Image (tube, rainbow, N blue to C red):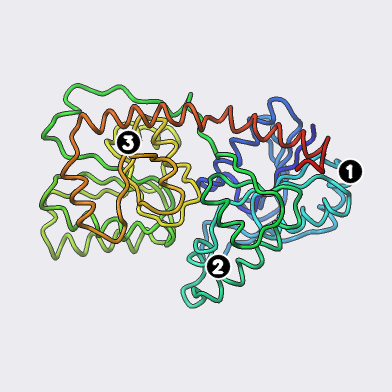
Amino acid sequence: MKLLLVSDDYWPNLDGGALFERRLANSLAAIHEVRVWAPSTTGPSGVQRDGGTVITRVASRSLKSNSRYRVARLRPLRLWQEFRRWKPDVIHVHNAGWLGLCAMALARIFGVARISTNHMTVQQVALSAPRLLRNVVLEKIFGSYLAWFNNKFDAVIVPSAYARRLALELGVESPVSIISNGVDVDYFIPGILQIGESQVDAPLRIVYVGRLDADKEVGALINLFKSIKSKVAIDLTVVGEGSCRTELENLVHRDAKRTDLNGLSIVFTGPVPEAEKRAYLQKADLFCLSSRWELQCIAALEAMACGTALLVADAGALPELCPDGSTGWLFDPFDADDLVRLIGSMTREEIAIRGEAARAFVTRRHSNEATVAQYERLYTLIVDEPEAT
């Protein structure tokens, strides 16, 4: 089968959606003929090979509000020629951006089956906009656009029940199905504890992995931990890069000069290679996230696969990864006392037990193999029996 995956936010970007798209493309390329359309990482257009995947890099420019991302400079004639020459069996669009729009229009013109996967909420998009534009009006405008865009597809895929509910509330009328983003459970595995690493009196090692952008609410997370610094010894490691990194580092350094951070250590690593990210997840006692807008959270899946228990906000799709508290703990992101109570009541044994349960949970329900198999079944169904979707 010839599959065209289209994304305005693709590898080497390090956010969860981009990493998932690359993993999906390379997994599918083992069996199918897979091409990807994505913005150029340097500016000029070109063709790149990544394993078995052929990537058409469309000429691009930096996004003014966030220079880490690039926006495609549309060349409709070139894309039309490539589409007509290759003519895929299915297009799978991962963003409602310029490339996604172009691919959707070409697929409709040539009668090609169309699938859309959504990776961000309306609130996340609004928070990624310049501060002056962040308001309810922008959320409503983008929400209407997102519904219109997804209604042009034969099927819409979301990673969680929460994400499906949001899509229906926006007015998406195309069939909406749930397929997990999945995680490579053969790569993300529990680490081997070194002697002395699990001492009872050692600080609680907590890690956050992900973008350092406004929608991730890492500042709120840091403030929550500052409120309990005198009660529990905590080592908080923040792994990732983003538009708020300097602001967050300044917040920590300013408070370190002004107040006593005894009992709380905060380290920013910046962006790290996959192997180093895995090592941080393996060494942590808990993976923590206070964002209220997660449609699933791939970093949380990776942490769980490493046998690391969750300490996440009781919001968005995160409770779906922590059913009945079996894989970790849920907390109220607005209530510091709730976090204090939870951390104060934890034991090392409970953390280890829930970490083991987290590994079992993702292996059983969120493996990459299961995700790829579900997408393959959908591709086949939508090509052979389009009315069935």
Q: Nearer the viewer, residue 264 or 381?
A: 381
In the drawing, does residue 336 fall left or right of residue 150?
left
Residue tagged 3: 309
Image coordinates of residue 238 in percent, x first then y, are 33, 48
Q: How far apart are marks 1 and 2 (CA)?
A: 34 Å
Q: Badge 1 local density, few (<14 within 10 Å), some, or many (20+)?
A: few
> In this picture, is 165 found above or below 323?
below
**Does label 2 or label 3 sit earlier along the sequence?**
2
Residue tagged 2: 64
> In this picture, is 66 found above or below 231?
below
Q: Residue at x 68, y 58 (%)?
A: 72
Residue 99 in view of the camera: no
Image coordinates of residue 352 in percent, x first then y, are 26, 29
Residue tagged 1: 85
For the residue marked with disc 2, what is the amino acid? Lys
Q: Secondary structure beneath disc 3?
A: strand
What is the quadrant of the N terminus in the image?
top right
In the drawing, does residue 217 fall left or right of residue 284?
right
What is the quadrant of the C terminus in the image?
top right
Image coordinates of residue 163 in percent, x first then y, are 54, 51
Q: Can you tell which of label 2 and label 3 is closer to the viewer?
A: 3
